[in-house]
């Protein structure tokens, strides 16, 4: 039985809903929403809208004005206690006269953490752990990168009911319906980078851009990243065209020709030599470590069959998988499947996974899956 009342759960649920409005806008900051209440009624709210913008708590305090004195504040992340581009939220909360703060999870960033302790030391009652699991799931990008230095990795793939990603002649547009494709653009809009392999880049010539939906406007496009071991991709591809986004990172083997590297860099792109696996393939773990060191908190992989095998089986790096299955059959023994590669010899080698959700996007089935070993903090509500 929860130690929190339905009202309290509802206020935190609203804070999390508000925080989601920052999807794709706030990186490298976390998604944060805040609700101020008095006498069990909401009086003000706010959400973080991007770096340099007021934090969610400050927006709510500004809206409430003098009404904040004696109020209770609900926020999905521990209020910060440091001076960055904006001032410490914990100090503003004390100054406003808020009597109690409910927050879901501690901030793992050592520069910003400590706000809860500051509040308690200055007479504000603090209750930690309300809807902690939901708050962790909301900010998995920020949390994984802050705690490990590595980006959170999402893999998205689409296939027929028999697991085929194209016909035997390579026709794959479009296997899934518009609703599934639109959802893919929502994912794209929220990540810091997108990653594809050489074969996908050459065959499909994708823009690797996120296109807005409804009235939403993009504030930036995700970084484009492509694996090209020996730098053989034509420079006429869309991923090298700045009109479709910013610069592209090309990951290659250390023995890639220097002359080709110079041609790519002359167009304003970056070339990163990456180590290789025992099988001689580019190391996804090595690439992700470099992306994390550059501040990239999240990566969306849209793979072909070979890259899916590398990311899911040979060198597991994926934290979350979105699979869309269209109500069609394609067949064919040699037709590409979702996961290709050399395959495994024994079921004991299989990579496990947890099915988190089964739903629909238009006529297509949507599976959301967490591979074994994917980032998934264990959260225990903390005592008040």
Image: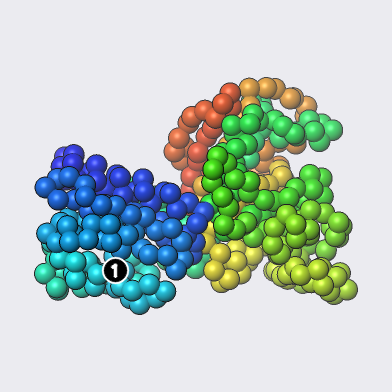
Report the number of discs.
1
- Residue that carries the numbered disc 1 in the rendered image: 89
Classify 313 as above or below 260: above
Image-based side of 140 in relation to 261, left or right: left
Tell me residue 371's x, y (percent): 51, 46
Image-based side of 63 in relation to 307, left or right: left
As rendered, which of 194 and 346 lies closer to the eye?
194
Image-based side of 360 in relation to 181, left or right: left
Image-based side of 330 in relation to 1, left or right: right
The kind of secondary structure element at disc 1 is helix
Could you tell me which residue is drawn at 33 percent across and 74 percent down? Answer: 87
Classify 178 as above or below 238: above
Could you tell me which residue is drawn at 26 percent across and 61 percent down? Answer: 61
Which quadrant of the rendered structure holds the N terminus? top left
Could you tell me which residue is drawn at 64 percent across and 29 percent down? Answer: 177
Q: Residues within 10 Å of mark 1 (few under 14, many from 20)?
A: many
As rendered, which of 191 and 150 lies closer to the eye?
191
Could you tell me which residue is drawn at 78 percent across and 58 percent down? Answer: 241
**Is residue 281 something that shows in the picture?**
no
């Amino acid at each position: 039985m929860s130690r929190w009342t339905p009202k309290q759960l509802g206020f935190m649920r609203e804070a999390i809903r508000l925080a989601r409005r920052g999807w794709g806008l706030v990186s490298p900051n976390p998604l944060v929403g805040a609700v101020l209440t008095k006498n069990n009624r909401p009086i003000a709210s706010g959400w973080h809208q991007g770096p340099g913008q007021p934090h969610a708590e400050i927006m709510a305090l500004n809206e409430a004005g003098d009404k904040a004195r004696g109020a209770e504040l609900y926020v999905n992340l521990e209020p910060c206690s440091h001076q960055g581009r904006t001032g410490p939220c914990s100090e503003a909360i004390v100054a406003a006269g808020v009597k109690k703060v409910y927050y879901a999870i501690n901030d793992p960033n050592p520069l910003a953490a400590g706000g809860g302790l500051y509040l308690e030391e200055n007479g504000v009652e603090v209750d930690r752990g309300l809807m902690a699991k939901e708050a962790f799931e909301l900010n998995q990008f920020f949390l994984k990168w802050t705690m490990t230095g590595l980006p959170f990795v999402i893999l998205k793939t689409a296939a027929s009911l028999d697991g085929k990603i194209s016909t035997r002649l390579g026709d794959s547009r479009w296997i899934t319906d518009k609703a599934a494709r639109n959802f893919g653009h929502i994912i794209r809009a929220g990540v810091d980078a997108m990653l594809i392999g050489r074969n996908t880049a050459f065959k499909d010539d994708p823009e690797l851009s996120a296109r807005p939906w409804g009235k939403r406007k993009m504030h930036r496009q995700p970084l484009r990243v492509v694996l090209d071991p020996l730098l053989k991709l034509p420079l006429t591809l869309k991923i090298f065209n700045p009109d479709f986004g910013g610069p592209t990172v090309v990951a290659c083997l250390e023995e890639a020709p220097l002359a080709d590297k110079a041609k790519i860099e002359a167009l304003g792109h970056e070339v990163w030599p990456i180590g290789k696996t025992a099988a001689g393939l580019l190391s996804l773990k090595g690439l992700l470590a470099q992306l994390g060191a550059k501040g990239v908190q999240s990566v969306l992989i849209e793979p072909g069959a070979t890259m899916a095998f590398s990311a899911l089986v040979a060198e597991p790096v994926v934290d979350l998988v979105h699979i869309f299955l269209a109500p069609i059959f394609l067949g064919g023994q040699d037709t590409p499947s979702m996961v290709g590669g050399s395959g495994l010899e024994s079921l004991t080698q299989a990579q496990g996974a947890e099915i988190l959700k089964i739903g629909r996007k238009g006529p297509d089935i949507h599976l959301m899956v967490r591979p074994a070993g994917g980032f998934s903090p264990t959260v225990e509500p903390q005592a008040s």
